[in-house]
Image: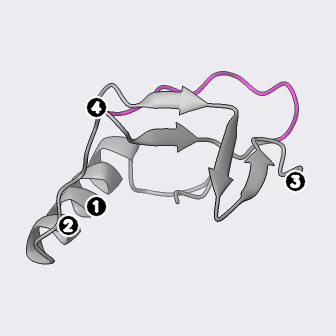
Amino acid sequence: MIPTITNIGLEEEFANIQQWTSINKMKINLAKTKEIVFKRPNPVHLASVANIEQVRTAKLLGVVCDSLLSV
């Protein structure tokens, strides 16, 4: 997760995640990886990293959240 105000860019944070998974002998399946951006209504569209699909809803452990933090 990257806060709104930060010195770290999306590319650098994704590189950190890739490094962490490599150290922990894990792989990121980019075909199954999705990105959800939690935001206020009507903001500008943010660019994604590494061609990861950006979605408006995500289901985690049976709970569906949307980008406006509704469940």
Q: Which residue is mark 4?
A: 50
Instruction: Identify which amino acid the numbered label 2 is placed on.
Output: Thr
Distance Cα–Cα, label 2 vs label 3: 29 Å
The secondary element bearing badge 4 is classed as loop
The secondary element bearing badge 3 is classed as loop
Tell me which residue sits at (63%, 42%) in the image. 37
Marks 2 and 1: which is nearer the front?
A: 2
Task: Residue 31: give x, y in percent of width and height.
Answer: 30, 33
Q: Is residue 29 left or right of residue 22?
A: right
Quadrant of the image occupied by residue 42? top right
Tell me which residue sits at (75%, 41%) in the image. 67
Q: Earlier in the sequence, mark 3 or mark 4?
A: 4
Task: Residue 48: give x, y in percent of width and height.
Answer: 44, 30
Q: Is residue 58 left or right of residue 14?
A: right
Q: Which residue is mark 3?
A: 71
Marks 3 and 4: which is nearer the front?
A: 3
The secondary element bearing badge 2 is classed as helix
The secondary element bearing badge 1 is classed as helix
- Residue 58 is inside the magenta segment: no
Distance Cα–Cα, label 1 vs label 3: 26 Å
Magenta span? 40-49
Task: Residue 56: give x, y in percent of width and height.
Answer: 69, 32
- Residue 46 is inside the magenta segment: yes
Residue 52 or residue 62, whichever sits in front = 62
Task: Residue 32: give x, y in percent of width and height.
Answer: 37, 39
Q: Which residue is mark 2?
A: 21
Instruction: Identify which amino acid the numbered label 1 is placed on.
Output: Ile
Q: Which residue is mark 1?
A: 17
Distance Cα–Cα, label 4 vs label 2: 16 Å
